[in-house]
Amino acid sequence: MPKGPVHSEIEKRLSAELSPTSLKVINDSASHHGHAGDDGSGESHFTVEIECAEFSGQSRLNRQRMVNKALGDLMQEQVHALAIKARAPGE
C-alpha cells in the first residue's frame, strides 16, 4: 500500500527534528476501521519505531514527549492514535 500524506509527513518531521539512526512508521489504520477515531482517511492510527541518539539517558516518557513534540499539530488534527517504540542506539 502506498504511503499517504500523513504517513509521509510523520516520517519527514521525525527525520528533521530527531535525526534518527532508524525509523519505521507503520499505518495501523486498517485494523481500526469503523472504530472511534477512524475518520475514514485511512491515516488515523500509527506505530512509530524510532532509534535516536538524543534518547540516550532519557526516560520512556521523555522520549515519547520528544516524538509528540516533533509531530506537533499532526497529533491534534490528523493522528488519532500513535504507539511509540523509542530507543537509544545499543538498546
Image (cartoon, rainbow, N blue to C red):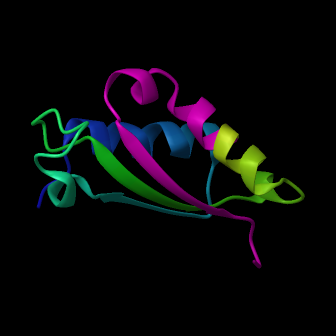
20 to 7, vertically: above or below: below
* Quadrant where the image shows the C terminus: bottom right
> Is 77 contained in the magenta span?
yes
Residue 79 lies in quadrant? top left
User: Residue at (22%, 52%) from the top-left corner?
Assistant: 29
In this rendered view, identify the residue nearer to me: 69 or 12.
69
Residue 33 position in % (x across, y down): 12, 50
User: Residue at (62%, 64%) from the top-left corner?
Assistant: 21
1 to 70, vertically: above or below: below
User: Residue at (31%, 48%) from the top-left corner?
Assistant: 45
In this rendered view, identify the residue nearer to me: 56 or 38.
38
Magenta segment: 66-91
Name the residue furthest front: 36
User: Residue at (13%, 55%) from the top-left corner?
Assistant: 2
In this rendered view, identify the residue nearer to me: 22 or 50.
50
- Lateral position of residue 23 relative to residue 36, left or right: right
Residue 76 position in % (x across, y down): 42, 22
Residue 87 position in % (x across, y down): 69, 65
- Lateral position of residue 74 relative to residue 28, left or right: right
Residue 66 position in % (x across, y down): 68, 40
* Quadrant where the image shows the N terminus: bottom left
Residue 88 lies in quadrant? bottom right
